[in-house]
Amino acid sequence: MEQDIKLKDVLYRYQNKEICTEDVISFLEEEVERSEIVFDRDRPSRCGFPEFIYGASKTASQIESAVRKIKQSGQQVLVTRLNKKKYNKLKKTFPEAVYDSSAEALILKNNKAAEPKGKIVIVTAGTSDIPVAMEAKYTAELCSCNVKTYFDIGVAGIHRLFSSIEKIRKADAVICIAGMEGALPSVLAGLVSCPVIAVPTSVGYGTSLQGFTPLFAMLTSCASGVTVVNINNGFGAACAAIRIINTRAI
Amino acid sequence: MEQDIKLKDVLYRYQNKEICTEDVISFLEEEVERSEIVFDRDRPSRCGFPEFIYGASKTASQIESAVRKIKQSGQQVLVTRLNKKKYNKLKKTFPEAVYDSSAEALILKNNKAAEPKGKIVIVTAGTSDIPVAMEAKYTAELCSCNVKTYFDIGVAGIHRLFSSIEKIRKADAVICIAGMEGALPSVLAGLVSCPVIAVPTSVGYGTSLQGFTPLFAMLTSCASGVTVVNINNGFGAACAAIRIINTRAI
Amino acid sequence: MEQDIKLKDVLYRYQNKEICTEDVISFLEEEVERSEIVFDRDRPSRCGFPEFIYGASKTASQIESAVRKIKQSGQQVLVTRLNKKKYNKLKKTFPEAVYDSSAEALILKNNKAAEPKGKIVIVTAGTSDIPVAMEAKYTAELCSCNVKTYFDIGVAGIHRLFSSIEKIRKADAVICIAGMEGALPSVLAGLVSCPVIAVPTSVGYGTSLQGFTPLFAMLTSCASGVTVVNINNGFGAACAAIRIINTRAI
Amino acid sequence: MEQDIKLKDVLYRYQNKEICTEDVISFLEEEVERSEIVFDRDRPSRCGFPEFIYGASKTASQIESAVRKIKQSGQQVLVTRLNKKKYNKLKKTFPEAVYDSSAEALILKNNKAAEPKGKIVIVTAGTSDIPVAMEAKYTAELCSCNVKTYFDIGVAGIHRLFSSIEKIRKADAVICIAGMEGALPSVLAGLVSCPVIAVPTSVGYGTSLQGFTPLFAMLTSCASGVTVVNINNGFGAACAAIRIINTRAI
Amino acid sequence: MEQDIKLKDVLYRYQNKEICTEDVISFLEEEVERSEIVFDRDRPSRCGFPEFIYGASKTASQIESAVRKIKQSGQQVLVTRLNKKKYNKLKKTFPEAVYDSSAEALILKNNKAAEPKGKIVIVTAGTSDIPVAMEAKYTAELCSCNVKTYFDIGVAGIHRLFSSIEKIRKADAVICIAGMEGALPSVLAGLVSCPVIAVPTSVGYGTSLQGFTPLFAMLTSCASGVTVVNINNGFGAACAAIRIINTRAI
Amino acid sequence: MEQDIKLKDVLYRYQNKEICTEDVISFLEEEVERSEIVFDRDRPSRCGFPEFIYGASKTASQIESAVRKIKQSGQQVLVTRLNKKKYNKLKKTFPEAVYDSSAEALILKNNKAAEPKGKIVIVTAGTSDIPVAMEAKYTAELCSCNVKTYFDIGVAGIHRLFSSIEKIRKADAVICIAGMEGALPSVLAGLVSCPVIAVPTSVGYGTSLQGFTPLFAMLTSCASGVTVVNINNGFGAACAAIRIINTRAI
Amino acid sequence: MEQDIKLKDVLYRYQNKEICTEDVISFLEEEVERSEIVFDRDRPSRCGFPEFIYGASKTASQIESAVRKIKQSGQQVLVTRLNKKKYNKLKKTFPEAVYDSSAEALILKNNKAAEPKGKIVIVTAGTSDIPVAMEAKYTAELCSCNVKTYFDIGVAGIHRLFSSIEKIRKADAVICIAGMEGALPSVLAGLVSCPVIAVPTSVGYGTSLQGFTPLFAMLTSCASGVTVVNINNGFGAACAAIRIINTRAI
Amino acid sequence: MEQDIKLKDVLYRYQNKEICTEDVISFLEEEVERSEIVFDRDRPSRCGFPEFIYGASKTASQIESAVRKIKQSGQQVLVTRLNKKKYNKLKKTFPEAVYDSSAEALILKNNKAAEPKGKIVIVTAGTSDIPVAMEAKYTAELCSCNVKTYFDIGVAGIHRLFSSIEKIRKADAVICIAGMEGALPSVLAGLVSCPVIAVPTSVGYGTSLQGFTPLFAMLTSCASGVTVVNINNGFGAACAAIRIINTRAI
């Protein structure tokens, strides 16, 4: 709409000979570039996702330069999969950063307080799933979501789930994290009506297949409407929850 | 709440000796049974899911009896994975049923018109993905959702996606269906901010691995926040979208 | 022991020259053969297993001759994995046989009533798992075990399990049958202290991997002490339960 | 039963106005919590399993706090998959603990001598399978079971098995541990009538597939009634044996 | 050597101008072709292998023409993997051919009686492995080998193997065929010193993985010096045995 | 041709008795050896491939001796998969060598300037794919190809690809490198008509399967005529491009 | 360029008031649509690929309507993966079409004779690979390429390859088709310098893994610069060769 | 035979009352034990295999004690898969031992010179396969076999194989070692008539699948009669060759 107005204006000024043919062509060429940028307007940074950096396949110095760039733009920063060794190189440059060594996540908040929105509940089957849960939590909180967590409520002691189920039911989106046989999302999705995003983890050994068994189990869940993200992908699950909450907010 | 009131009432009447001890115990025992039913209150039929029957592993006569039961309760019916041969046995009993032989779905509507709610967009990469899309469409429509479809807009001719992108953007949830390399959800999720539920299909041969290649590709998508359901699971994707819409509606 | 007596007897008669050296050698050679048979004394037919025939890789005429042989010895017969086509060839010869076409099992009882022993409980997650359950049931009953069944009590509607749990608890062995994500044994084994034998089934599609996903899930169960048999192997699960009961009975 | 009595008592006192309505409701609410705890009464610690901690995915300090808690409750402790490095951090705090570095197991006994019960036989195919056998042994012994072991009696030298077979036959449960081609349980189960729990190990290279080849071989054993646990899962096999013995004991 | 003589002769005649330069070049070019044929001199038909045709991926008419060609050259014919349907088309043209429908093999002998050579023993674990054994037998016998067979002597009843072991020991090569867990070659190779060629079969279901489990088990056998061929490849095993016997015969 | 002339000459001199029969035979024997060498004339070093050494499975001293040999022959050297540790041992001996530690490649140029030929474009989906791209670039440049690179233009931000597409179109061959879901070659090959060689990388985790997911995705691409090389095989992709350019140049 | 001229013209006429503002906006909007079509200009039909239809996942009537559409546009038609049954439905409508039942390909030529261009050589390892070769041949010939074929020259009789190698060397691109162990491309690429496109086939059984073994073997070939397409994808290999030849032709 | 004599003797003395009944029973019991030992007479140490120790899953001190025991019995020793670290602990105790660090093999010869027997040829495709070849060589030489080696004659430079083929042909058994695509055994077995034992190696990356691709390729070889051992199993291949040679020698 705004674009059309600008275009009409240009054409009008051109017709009035205020600007020459070259100016119009130049304007249109810029328009093309802008239209490319248009494709970008839904990219993470614009739809409420935090500026994040996947640290696993980058060197410490590559990460440092990326963090500096985002920070200078006044935005918050989340680095995922940042191992201790790389963090040790970064911590002098960014002493204000918070680092969670089990989740391998580094967070750099800014001072702008955003209005909290949406209720995300994160549950884990075991204590070993907590690092993945924390990655999801950091991601969601940087996007100003309210996050509640219920850890270690797996199916081998089913009563642990029941004592929290009423509170879980009230979420806009539930992130359900489990390794080994990955049964928790099936039980949980049978008890709540809100969206359930399942995250398989690589906890276990042998037939847990580094997380492929819970992944496959969650995808073939007997409970309807469970969706799944990659193994250990707490970040991705949080982004999916944010997509849900942002759409609600429209 | 209502429960509490009943309980107080029972206790009050007990205290007033209107009812005896056995009556209270009997009430409480029923309560336990009711509390079990409570666990069921979020099950599909109650949260807006259609009454559906997974036809693949049931005989024609088992399906017939299930359909009759649901129909008698006044609800709509969806039978998924119902092959032609089984349908031929059912069609005499349910001549009013609509059957889509490519999607292998049978639908039995009732006359109760529900208020339409939510906007679901279903896109497919190729024409071979359409049966899965139709399964999703039937499921969503039985739940009174508005559904728009865009078929055959895969990435090998990327302009086909662009011409529809503005309309896709306005959805409450996008269901994105693709086989072979399964690239469409990655491109699409980079262009929209709403929830994207990806459905891999078993279209292709050789390294498409009966749908495991697009499944894995979608799970490891470079676009953030894509969630995934089982191969060819149009029904499950629709249920996930319904969970999102139902939560919005609260 | 009995052997020793015979041997002493032979040696005694030899010493008394009632029999010659060749007789003793001949006796000892027979002994060797007998000792080989000794290795057989724990084979199925002797430890309470029914005489069974795995029908999948045998022709109808091979099966017929095997059934006749067992029947003539006065024993009961169980043929597993016997498809309809083969059964149709057999039913004229054995009109008294009972055939379950969904379980693909044929049973030929004899009239000897054995003292019932042991309590086996068989539970299934879904209705599609019932054929596997029936194979287990037929096997156990031919071995004179008491069998109770609880079908369709899977985890997506967890209350169904709870209403039967007290009765399940009293079993000598529980056979727990589930396809898809195979979560039921994990939940169940957290609620009972008796042996739990899990049977994965090939129910489902896509990531259920023809039963490998529930197989792997059951093996990596978060509940301790669950043991597992091959996919769809109801017969094997029953044999394992019989081993447990027979050992109890000693 | 006991519950019912309490309930009647409460109701009686309520009817007698000794307690008010709120008291009854409060009692019932507690009851609900108790009924949840009921689900827990079969959990490991109550059915004779030792209090154990899976050490692989926990930090040394997490393990330390867990051990301290269990120890203070007067129970015995078993930590499995505890590597040397973590043990070195723990040994100062628990100098009385016994540590087996090859089995990666730490045991903390108490002084309460329990009545020994049940006969478990543990056999291994090779010497490399011994650490898994020891994990099973420690688990079973903490539960007061009698354990006998026969190591290195694999099928390539079949006479080694035969010389011990008579003693193996007398077990309540046999745990049979093998890597590589995993053939031992098949041969063994053909020679004994008691329950055989097979444990595949990751011994070998190439086509042994880190234990998946013996796992699959054991599951598809030509001997009937063999059950299987996860790769290297000595602990799980012992728990399964304990379930068998505990049920016997009823 | 013979070649050299011919060459010298040609050169001599050339020097004597009996033949021209073109004749020499032409001779040399033929020589090149001959030298290529040299590479062929060890091909099956020359090293004692029968002329065989792999029938699975050929049409009936392609097979017919191939059989006719070999037959006309006076050689014997073996067609492997020839299904019933194709055989029915061939049997009119070759009424003298012998067809084994379970082994899916067609044999056309000639009247030339060859001196029998070598002793091949073929053993199978079960009756379902017999078709593969027969394919091996037909192949070996067409190459004039002595073949002895011992069927159904698998490890679940280990005494069956022992009663034949002395006779098996005398073979020049043992072909050992087994499906399911594929344990027989391990036990057998521990008892004999001659070459053991193991053939996995696709007998079984679930974790037998269409023969990959016995294949992997045989390759990771704890008995030294077992070699393996492809699943169900009786023909290949026989060819390997023939290579051994032919080399002995030099 | 040249060979024929020599042969005729030898025969002519032989006919003139300038040389004896043995000389001709000797010449022909040498010819045989030469004809073997003929098979080599298309090997890498002759068809414009650089002399390269695959460093992963060689020791530092083996590599050193190979480099020295090639260098002495006056040719350029490329060592691929040379880790830092091995490089540190080599750098003293070859101080003039250039080493790229992320691509793990060592290059030793000579001073002979070759005429540049062909246009190769190398594109990557992400920054983590750059090391593989650099291996391809070094390989192609040592063969005197013109190389242009476009990094980090993956499909999640599709506009990045479009801004470079006109320049990419003009290549003789495009090498397209991507990890994770590997979607870039599908989109790219739909937009250009020149050969597209796809290289999957092991970037990602979980379902990226160490590069097998992008490998399979690229092989089942919905865009026609994409060819693929091994995971991370930048060298191989460059060699394929060189084959195309060298054939053009004929 | 042409676009720019049109744009300038439009703007000029606008400035001269020959056309109104709405006309310019309308022109620009059309331009946007045209620019989308631009993305299509390299699509198969324009870069010399035949108009082809993948018949496997389409119904006979869908194919019929697609063929009719292409035919009416005056172009040639190739339908791949068209089984006999579907062909029988089509042959009445298109009696002039040529159908190859083993390659499952239908070809509809037009009368326009194109200038032949490029030399493609297609080689197969065995006779069972010929159907895949024919699919490639039909594809390439519809694009006016010269095609030569050399069938059944696999590595087990290596001399067969050598007798044709000189003629193979002269190709612009070699398509090398092999199943089972897929060794031919490795040997061939060591003998020629032109591009080698390898096509694995699903010929074989057991460890040939429906073509995955030759696929993986070709990708890890010890000969440099071999590229690979999907299993049985003769069409894709031909398209890749056409890309090479079309680029040469520029 | 000898046994029979002893038995008759015992019986004779018993009949003569030189010995009592208990003596005979005792003798027979010993006989049983002896007959068990009989099964062992073909075990490695007796059929010419060296006394070997698989070092990978044993500690240095376990290996040390095993070596000492074998050495004291006057036999030769081979330790396979002995890493450098463990060797360093052993070398002080056995300074006379020879250690090959690339093959990870330790050899301890004795002074008894055995008559050399049999001709084993070992060929490798590449230089990276040499360690596996050396393991085979050490094994065969300790068994007094003549061993010839031809290294680095893989199929990408096929002339290298041809220059050695005549010498390879004369072997009693050929061990053919290759990684990556594993094509060498197919080419080689097409050129020789003696037994070919193929050994896949884990050389390569990506689709070489740690040796599973050459393993599968060798098993599905188009050349008949190739047999295969486990990945990198040079020891096993040598044992198979020794079985062949020992049988020849009878």
Image (spheres, coloured by chain):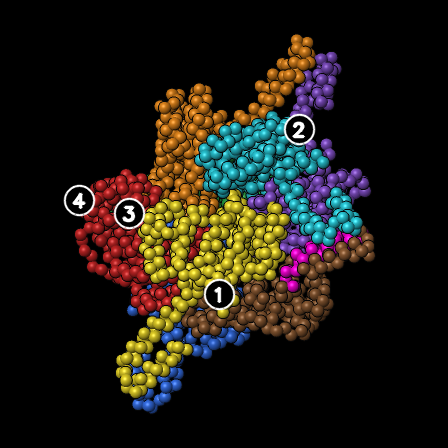
Chain colours: A cyan, B purple, C green, D orange, E blue, F yellow, G brown, H red
- Is disc 1 in contact with disc 3, using a CB cutoff of under 8 Å? no
Q: Main secondary structure of the magenta part?
A: helix
Disc 1, SS: helix
Q: Is residue G96 left or right of residue G228?
A: right
Cα distance, mark 1 to mark 2? Answer: 63 Å
Q: Is residue E9 left or right of residue D11?
A: left
Q: Find disc 1 in the rendering and name its residue.
A: F246
Residue range in magenta is G22-46
Disc 4, SS: loop
Cα distance, mark 2 to mark 3? Answer: 69 Å
Cα distance, mark 4 to mark 2? Answer: 107 Å
Disc assigned to residue H79: 3
| Marks 1 and 2 on same chain | no
Q: Find disc 4 in the rendering and name its residue.
A: H18
> Which amino acid is tagged 3?
Val
Disc 3, SS: strand
Q: Is residue G119 left or right of residue A242?
A: left
| Marks 1 and 3 on same chain | no
> Which amino acid is tagged 2?
Glu
Within 10 Å of the Cα at label 1, are there few (<14), some (14-19), or many (20+) other Cα atoms? many
Query: Which quadrant holds the C terminus of chain C?
Result: top left
Question: Considering depth in this image, is A76 or H154 the residue closer to the camera?
Answer: A76
Q: Residue visible at 64% across and 38% down?
A: A46
Disc 2, SS: loop
Q: Residue visible at 68% across and 11% down?
A: D20
Q: Find disc 2 in the rendering and name its residue.
A: A115
